[in-house]
Image (cartoon, grey):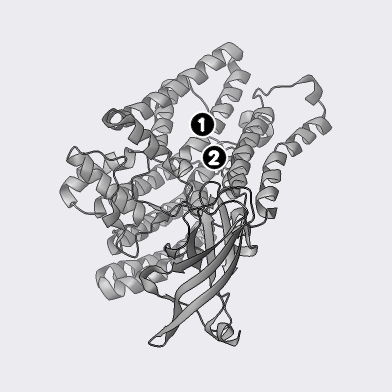
């Protein structure tokens, strides 16, 4: 484990050193020293004898990691869209202004600040996160008056949590922390930490039910049903109180705007993005008229995993901190950041909560589920509705039948599209309001302008559209690459249709 941790320090280090040599040579020198430390740690991890010596090597790995993260912050602390939005939220809090429901479109004028486009043809320019991070950034922003305030807070929290985790994890990798004990003073503190986590990031919301199921199961095995229920209620209440304290000010400012803001990622119907099964429809087929079933599948899988956890908590307990993220693989936003963000918690759970901690945990035993085969059947059926939803979403045909007539122009050495005449036929029984964009590979461009054509396409009718790219020109790649596609999306229902844009050569040939 020490050697693996040492090797991981190489990730991204060369890019940081290269950047530092161009902008901050002292930081580059510090990174060079870190390289030496990495090599020394690698040698010592294989040579030292005895647990105390190995702990000292682990400490040196920790110090090196902290140094590299600090160097990374010094090199780049401007942040991306989340950091910029959080800094703006801290500024508004500092001046007593509202945070939620306020669009800030000027923040997205730089290339590194991404815009979350929605399937309804718009984009989201508001703050869509719980408020704790912005609150913590306020005193720092009062001094720095820049985005660096918003990035400094999570960076400092990351370093502090890393150091704390290092001290809490058992050196020989065994359980020494009563992670699931609650109803005591430390249990109340942990409940408050859970509430604070839910007030900082929506991903914690999906983890909380699994933690509560595990807590109740362990405590019921120790205390019996009534006392275990009382402990679980107190734990939940303490977490809810901590969450409420953080959110109270913003809810009082405007309850509807605050509620819509913190629920925004769940309701905004953002454009498809990620590495999950949602990629079938935009990238591997011509589209789908039932993308909503991806969301239905994600929700049903989450419920199925919760039910399986309740029924088989003794068996599934070691993976309780990992199980919630399986549901995101089916969602319409299934990007790697969702999986990476809470991976430190996976490590903490693996190190401190072995399966033996759940050996006496309570789990319901319905009369017809006492046999191994019956329980295995139930476990296999739990994800069945989710898989059915995925099949429906992936197998459904695109809602539009599109034929394209592109117009090309040359800007210098580049050839690109200036407009596309689109003949679209709505093959469904639902009225659709298509919005057009292009893609080369993954992702999507800014929305194209609909110069002519109806806003709503009636069921089983055809219409002619003229779509023009942003700034009037969209360069098309040459060579033998994947080509450029025009996509048409709708928000209600969620649909996508893709059509290959002919190249200038092939269009001239026809």
Q: Is residue 369 above or below residue 89?
A: above
The location of residue 100, given as percent across then percent down, is 31, 39
Callout 1: SS: loop
Locate residue 383: give its quadrant. Answer: top right
85 displayed left or right of 220: left
In the rendered image, the residue lying farthest to the top is 226
Toward the viewer: 263 or 137?
Answer: 263
Question: How far is the residue under mark 2 from the one under mark 1?
Answer: 8 Å
Mark 1 crowd level (few <14, some 14–19, many ≥20, 10 Å Cα): some
Locate residue 211: give its quadrant. Answer: top right
Residue at (26% x, 56% y) in the render: 106
Toward the viewer: 415 or 75?
Answer: 415
Toward the viewer: 421 or 284?
Answer: 421
Residue at (56% x, 66% y) in the render: 423
The location of residue 33, given as percent across then percent down, is 34, 67
| Quarter in which the N terminus is drawn | bottom right
Q: Is residue 414 above or below residue 434?
A: below
- Does the CB distance between marks 2 and 1 fall below 8 Å? yes
Q: Which mark is residue 349?
A: 2
Toward the viewer: 264 or 158?
Answer: 264
Name the residue beneath numbered marker 1.
Answer: 179
The location of residue 193, given as percent across then percent down, is 40, 32
């Amino acid at each position: 484990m020490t050697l693996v941790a040492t090797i991981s320090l190489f990730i991204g280090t060369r890019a940081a050193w290269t950047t530092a040599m161009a902008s901050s040579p002292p930081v580059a020198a510090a990174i060079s020293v870190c390289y030496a430390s990495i090599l020394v740690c690698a040698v010592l991890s294989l040579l030292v004898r005895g647990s105390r010596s190995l702990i000292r090597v682990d400490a040196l790995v920790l110090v090196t990691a902290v140094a590299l993260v600090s160097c990374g912050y010094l090199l780049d602390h401007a942040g991306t869209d989340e950091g910029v939005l959080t800094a703006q939220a801290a500024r508004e809090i500092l001046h007593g202004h509202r945070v939620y429901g306020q669009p800030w479109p000027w923040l997205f004028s730089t290339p590194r600040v991404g815009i979350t486009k929605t399937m309804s043809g718009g984009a989201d320019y508001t703050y869509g996160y719980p408020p704790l991070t912005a609150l913590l950034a306020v005193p720092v922003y009062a001094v720095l008056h820049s985005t660096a305030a918003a990035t400094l807070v999570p960076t400092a929290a990351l370093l502090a949590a890393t150091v704390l985790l290092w001290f809490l994890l058992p050196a020989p990798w065994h359980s020494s922390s009563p992670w699931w004990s609650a109803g005591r003073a430390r249990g109340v503190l942990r409940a408050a930490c859970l509430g604070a986590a839910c007030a900082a990031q929506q991903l914690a919301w999906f983890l909380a039910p699994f933690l509560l199921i595990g807590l109740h199961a362990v405590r019921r095995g120790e205390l019996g049903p009534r006392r275990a229920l009382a402990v679980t209620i107190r734990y939940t209440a303490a977490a809810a109180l901590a969450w409420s304290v953080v959110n109270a000010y913003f809810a009082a400012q405007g309850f509807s705007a605050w509620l819509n803001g913190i629920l925004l990622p769940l309701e905004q119907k953002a454009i498809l993005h990620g590495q999950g099964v949602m990629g079938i429809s935009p990238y591997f087929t011509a589209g789908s008229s039932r993308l909503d079933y991806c969301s239905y599948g994600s929700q049903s899988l989450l419920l199925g995993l919760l039910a399986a956890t309740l029924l088989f908590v003794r068996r599934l307990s070691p993976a309780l901190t990992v199980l919630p993220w399986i549901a995101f693989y089916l969602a319409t936003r299934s990007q790697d950041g969702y999986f990476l963000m809470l991976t430190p918690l996976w490590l903490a759970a693996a190190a401190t909560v072995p399966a033996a901690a759940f050996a006496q945990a309570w789990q319901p035993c319905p009369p017809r589920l006492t046999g191994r085969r019956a329980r295995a059947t139930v476990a296999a059926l739990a994800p069945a509705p989710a898989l059915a939803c995925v099949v429906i979403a992936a197998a459904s045909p695109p809602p539009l039948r599109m034929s394209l007539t592109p117009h090309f122009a040359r800007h210098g050495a580049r050839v690109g599209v200036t407009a596309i005449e689109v003949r679209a036929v709505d093959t469904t029984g639902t009225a659709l309001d298509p919005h057009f964009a292009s893609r080369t590979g993954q992702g999507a461009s800014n929305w194209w302008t609909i110069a002519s054509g109806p806003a709503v396409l009636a069921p089983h009718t055809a219409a002619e559209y003229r779509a023009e790219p942003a700034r009037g020109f969209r360069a098309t790649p040459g060579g033998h690459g994947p080509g450029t596609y025009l996509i048409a999306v709708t928000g209600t229902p969620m649909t996508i249709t893709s059509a290959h844009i002919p190249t200038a050569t092939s269009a001239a040939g026809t």
